[in-house]
Image (cartoon, coloured by chain):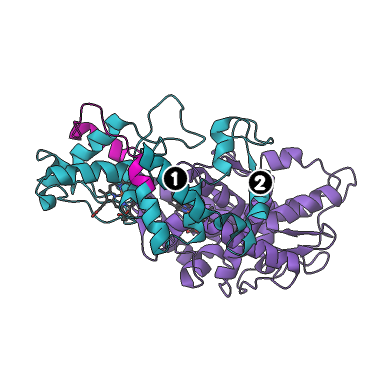
């Protein structure tokens, strides 16, 4: 708990300079343009009214720092960010990190969620195949991220690797600050149970990923 | 001429639906679409008038010349930046600064401006229906943007960055391109920042640096999209990518979109205009 506060403080300290500019444009000016340009998805001529939509207009401190650094934060900022990211990871209460890989595969396939045309009462998918090769049988995979084939096998299915994988999916910045991969747990895209299922997809011996 | 285009497009439509039926089965919609594009290309090599997007150009030309609005005039005196009534090469130099509006405008916002100021049209409904829905066969904006843009065909993109407001739009566009926001932390750069990458099976152009990717991509909107069987515009492209970014709806003709297009045009400098292009 204490470390969370400390690293959050460190992070905001490192970020004070960021507020001033964004790519040569005063941040204030940029924010004004954003606020006036985006409309509420339901009332398409008015400014976003609900907190869900209004909050998306203002980048959080991590997003601001990464945008400013063009995703290559300097060493000190990177170290602070890794710490803050690690502190944000919530683990399951019973300590079990491996869920159901079959369900994990469905979540990895599902690209829906949080767009304005998505149903709000359905859980979001992880859309992992958009960026990664995972089960070799799925040929429609993207290449923004590295292939994750034989992921668990390559890591000897170790307890340590299971924990690192869970944390990576929960908040990708734990290992790679300013990663292009979304922070699925920290940003509330996926639930703890969904992240367990995805961890199983990658780390369970029975998962097709490791066959 | 018009008749010939119409017939070409109709024949192609029939050939295409037959072609798509033949490749259905386990093939994905994406594979269907790329086979469809191949087929279109083959037919267009034989008959350049077979591009269904040309129907939009024709409708746009007719609409451009039609007297409308409270002023009962056509759009023929509209100044798209090269002087009243000059359309040749106009799109290749947009977005640009317009003193009468004291604003940087892209093709679509400028058309809207002329409808309002020149014709005295109520542009509310035009703006609201700027992007046609499937089956509607096109919107007024899609027709007009296709016509105006086609008048720059064969010309190289010449970004206008001398006016301070044009410079500002470029800088804002660059900042927006790299700005990560929303629950997925996406920026445009997340998906368009590395050469040769893809999402699922879709190739992603690298728009983060000047070059062939940007030239080929930006000089070819409006485009006839095989996947939706309709013409889509640059405003629509920006709006759809912001949807994928999980952002709220970006406003048609908003400053953010104008800024982004200004930035993209600069990345695409020198690219040869070819519209309406044929895309997935």
Which hue belongs to chain A?
A: cyan
Q: Position of residue B266 (x, y in %)?
A: 60, 69
Of residue B139 and residue A136, the one placed in the foreground of this image is A136
Start and end of the magenta stretch? A84-110
Quarter placement of the N terminus of chain A: top left
Q: Position of residue B18 (x, y in %)?
A: 38, 46
Mark earlier in primary sequence (1, 2): 1
Left or right placement of residue B36 versus residue B251 in this view: left
Rendered residue at 83%/63% (across/down): B99
Q: Is residue B226 visible?
A: no
Residue A146: x %, y % from top left: 27, 56
Can you identify the residue that label 1 sits on? A8
Residue at far right of view:
B71
The chain ID associated with circle 1 is: A
Residue B101 shown in magenta: no
- SS for tag 2? helix
- Which of the labelled discs sits on residue A24, or is there none? none
- Relative image position of residue B142 (x, y in whole percent): 64, 50
For residue B279, side relative to residue B100 (left or right): left
Q: Quadrant of residue B202?
A: bottom left
Q: Nearer the viewer, residue A85 or B154?
A: A85
Chain in purple on the image:
B
Image-based side of A199 in relation to B124, left or right: left
Q: Is residue A102 magenta?
A: yes
């Amino acid at each position: 708990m204490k470390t969370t506060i400390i690293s959050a403080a460190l992070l905001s300290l490192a970020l004070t300079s960021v507020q001033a500019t964004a790519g040569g444009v005063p941040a204030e000016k940029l924010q004004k343009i954003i606020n006036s340009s985006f409309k509420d998805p339901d009332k398409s001529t008015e400014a976003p009214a609900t907190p869900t939509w209004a909050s998306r207009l203002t980048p959080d401190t991590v997003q601001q720092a990464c945008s400013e650094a063009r995703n290559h934060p300097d060493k000190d900022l990177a170290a602070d960010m890794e710490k803050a990211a690690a502190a944000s990871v919530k683990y399951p209460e019973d300590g079990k990190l491996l869920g159901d890989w079959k369900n994990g595969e469905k979540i990895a396939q599902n690209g829906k969620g949080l767009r304005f045309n998505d149903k709000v009462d359905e859980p979001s998918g992880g859309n992992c195949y958009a960026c990664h090769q995972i089960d070799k049988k799925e040929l429609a995979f993207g290449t923004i991220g590295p292939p994750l084939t034989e992921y668990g096998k390559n890591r000897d299915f170790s307890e340590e690797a299971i924990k690192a994988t869970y944390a990576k999916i929960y908040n990708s910045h734990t290992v790679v600050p300013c990663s292009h991969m979304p922070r699925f747990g920290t940003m509330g895209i996926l639930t703890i149970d969904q992240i367990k299922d995805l961890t199983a997809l990658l780390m369970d011996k029975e998962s097709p990923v490791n066959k | 001429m018009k008749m010939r285009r119409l017939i070409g497009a109709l024949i192609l439509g029939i050939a295409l639906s037959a072609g798509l039926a033949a490749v259905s089965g386990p093939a994905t919609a994406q594979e269907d679409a790329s086979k469809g594009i191949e087929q279109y290309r083959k037919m267009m090599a034989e008959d350049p008038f077979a591009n269904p997007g040309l129907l939009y150009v024709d409708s746009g030309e007719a609409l451009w010349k039609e007297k409308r609005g409270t002023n009962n005039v056509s759009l023929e005196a509209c100044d798209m930046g090269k002087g009243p009534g000059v359309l040749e090469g106009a799109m290749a130099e947009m977005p640009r600064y317009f003193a009468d509006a004291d604003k940087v405008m892209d093709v679509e916002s400028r058309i809207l401006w002329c409808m309002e100021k020149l014709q005295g049209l109520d542009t509310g409904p035009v703006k609201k229906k700027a992007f046609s829905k499937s089956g509607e066969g096109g919107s007024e904006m899609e027709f007009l943007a296709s016509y105006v843009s086609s008048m720059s065909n064969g010309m190289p993109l010449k970004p206008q960055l001398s006016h301070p407001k044009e410079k500002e739009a470029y800088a804002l566009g660059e900042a927006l391109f790299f700005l990560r926001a929303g629950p997925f932390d996406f920026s445009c750069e997340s998906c368009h920042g590395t050469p040769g990458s893809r999402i699922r099976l879709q190739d992603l152009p690298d728009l983060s640096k000047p070059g062939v990717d940007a030239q080929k991509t930006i000089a070819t909107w409006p485009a006839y999209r095989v996947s939706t069987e309709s013409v889509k515009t640059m405003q629509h492209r920006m709006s759809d990518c912001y949807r994928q970014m999980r952002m709220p709806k970006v406003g048609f003709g908003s400053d953010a979109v104008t800024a982004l297009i200004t930035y993209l045009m600069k990345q695409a400098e020198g690219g040869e205009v070819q519209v309406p292009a044929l895309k997935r």
